[in-house]
Image (cartoon, rainbow, N blue to C red):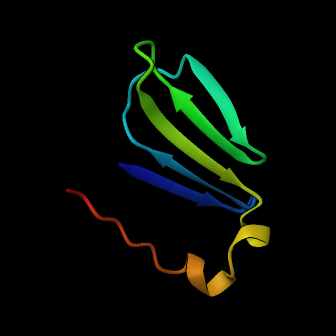
Amino acid sequence: MKTDHTERDALYFRLDDDEIVESGEVQLGMILDFDENGRLVGIEILSLSTRFAPEKLRVMQFETA
């Protein structure tokens, strides 16, 4: 998994290196990317500064089952 938090006020989680063939905005500023098999390969969250407090963005926690 790769993450990217850039100067453009967005966060991108890349779950797989497969080619993105389709994207869909599921909620304003929340975009999901899919591969050719319909599997989720990326998640983009736009306008981070309006969704989260800055101190929440300094630490990310991930859990896997």
Q: From the viewer's perspective, is residue 22 above or below residue 4?
A: above
Q: Residue at x 61, y 87 (%)?
A: 55
Count the marks: 0
Specify whether 9 is left or right of 58: right
Give the quarter of the image for residue 43.
top right
Name of the residue lying farthest toward the top:
36
Q: From the viewer's perspective, is residue 58 above or below residue 64?
A: below
> Where is residue 65 shown, x and y percent of the image?
20, 56
Q: Residue at x 79, y 70 (%)?
A: 50
Name of the residue lying farthest toward the bottom:
55
Q: From the viewer's perspective, is residue 12 above or below residue 58?
A: above
> Where is residue 27 shown, x and y percent of the image?
72, 44
Specify whether 22 is left or right of 40: right
Q: Nearer the viewer, residue 15 or 8?
A: 15
> Where is residue 41 shown, x and y percent of the image?
44, 33
> Where is residue 47 shown, x and y percent of the image?
77, 60
Give the quarter of the image for residue 52.
bottom right
Q: Residue at x 78, y 46 (%)?
A: 28
Q: Residue at x 54, y 55 (%)?
A: 4
